Amino acid sequence: MLLLLPSLLLPTAKDEAAFAAARGKMVREQILERGITDSRILNAFRRVPRHLFVAPQYRDQAYGDFPLPIEENQTISQPYIVAIMTSVIAPAYKKKVLEIGTGSGYQAAVLAELVREVYTIEIIPQLAQKSKKLLEGMGYKNIHCRTGNGYLGWPEAAPFDGIIITCAPDHIPPLLLEQLAVGGRMVIPISYSTTVQDLLLVEKLPNGKLKKTNLIPVMFVPMIRAGNAR
Ligand code: SAH
């Protein structure tokens, strides 16, 4: 399948074995041993080749316990944070998930291993094009990519069983809440200042009320405001 990616400097088979070993270690030490034990989720992380989502000069660090830079001053999140967000949003029954902030496409690929359809929006066109090409080249047919302002969501595909926001706004975007199904879950970093953010779980209960739970402090890049965002 990797042969479908002619534009990448491809790792050799020997490199691939080393990357697979590093990936196994990442899953064990950074995800399983920190309490995420759902085997479906662990297997999704074992399958997705994270090193293909980072720039070639960072490949050797792709399985480290930290975020890494991608293009346009953006970042691919630390594996454990991707795992927490995934475990909140993607238990077996979740069918359709919206992601805001495609970035490298890594989180979208992990989700695509677990749910039926993934819709993902990226505001920076260069990143959107690059991740779309990569995900298509890897053979994912259940990821729908769009270039645009995620603050507005993807109304034509709503409602979503899960919404995962990987950039930090200072409030919950109201249109995203509208596009969350009853019984659905949203996971969103909310920034209270330039240095303080909380990862929030927002559940839309069967009676339509919202239940908010603080999960952990996090540090995401800010959600970019476009002209018509508010
Ligand atoms: N999920 C990504 C990491 C995302 S970094 C991964 O797995 O690699 C956050 C991304 O959100 C950046 O690429 C940034 O350009 C994007 N972003 C910021 N504001 C946005 C907005 N309003 N709409 C859509 N994407 C946005």
Image (cartoon, helix red, strand yellow):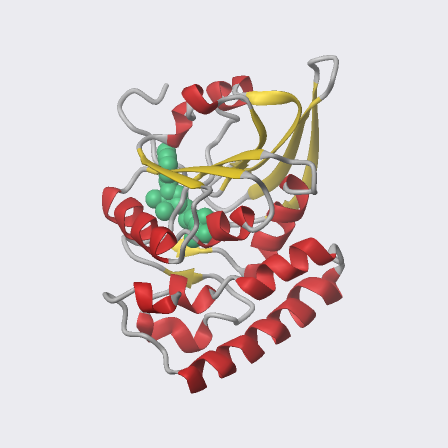
Residue 62 picture location, percent across and down: 46, 70
If the image is split into quadrants, where does the C terminus sit? top left
* Quarter of the image where ligand 1 sits: top left
Q: Nearer the viewer, residue 106 or 7?
A: 7
Q: Nearer the viewer, residue 130 or 83?
A: 130
Residue 220 picture location, percent across and down: 47, 47
Q: How many callouts does the rendering have?
A: 0
Q: Is residue 3 left or right of residue 34?
A: left
Residue 210 placement: quadrant: top right
Q: Residue at x 63, y 40 (%)?
A: 89
Q: Is residue 110 left or right of residue 183?
A: left
In the image, residue 104 sits, relative to residue 142, either above or below, namely below
Residue 138 picture location, percent across and down: 39, 58
Residue 178 picture location, percent across and down: 53, 17
Q: Residue at x 49, y 50 (%)?
A: 107
Q: Residue at x 46, y 33 (%)?
A: 169
Residue furthest to the top? 207
If the image is split into quadrants, where does the N terminus sit? bottom left
Q: Nearer the viewer, residue 64 or 5?
A: 5
In the image, residue 221 sits, relative to residue 33, either above or below, namely above
